[in-house]
Image: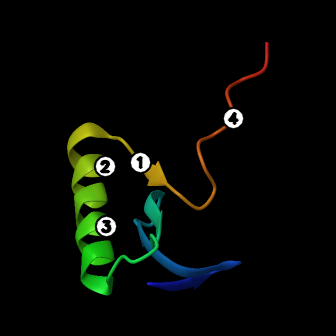
């Protein structure tokens, strides 16, 4: 929880091998709401292998 580069309020979770979630605090979102969203993002990564990255955005599709 804290600053990530130019993002003043972020929540991140990672293992030794990879980033699981990188969330940006939404306008009006409380600390507890951000923490709950991070918890949900971690569960989604574990259960569905879907990783959320609000800071860098989605990866670029491969060029053809």
CB-based contact (under 8 Å), mark 2 and mark 4:
no
Residue 43 in the image: above or below residue 35: above
* Mark in front: 3 vs 2: 3
How far, Cα to Cα, is label 1 from label 2? 5 Å
Q: In which quarter of the image is the N terminus?
A: bottom left
| Disc 2 target residue | 45
Residue 44 in the image: x percent, y percent?
A: 26, 48
- Crowding at dot 1, Cα within 10 Å, few <14 / some 14-19 / many 20+, comes out as some
Farthest right residue in view: 64
Q: Quadrant of the C terminus?
A: top right
Going by the image, does 55 lie left or right of 63?
A: left
Residue 15 in the image: x percent, y percent?
A: 40, 65
Image-quadrant location for residue 11: bottom left
As helix, strand or loop, the secondary structure at mark 3 comes to helix
Say which of 15 and 2 sits in front. 2
| Disc 1 target residue | 51
How far, Cα to Cα, is label 1 from label 4? 15 Å
| Disc 4 target residue | 60
Give the tally of numbered discs: 4
| Disc 3 target residue | 38
Residue 35 in the image: x percent, y percent?
A: 28, 76
Identify the residue shown where x is 31% and y is 49%. Answer: 45
């Amino acid at each position: 929880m804290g600053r990530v580069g130019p993002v003043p309020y972020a929540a991140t979770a990672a293992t030794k091998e990879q980033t699981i979630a990188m969330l940006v605090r939404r306008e009006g979102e409380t600390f507890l709401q951000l923490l709950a969203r991070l918890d949900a993002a971690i569960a989604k990564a574990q259960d569905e292998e879907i990783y959320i990255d609000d800071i860098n955005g989605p990866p670029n599709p491969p060029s053809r």
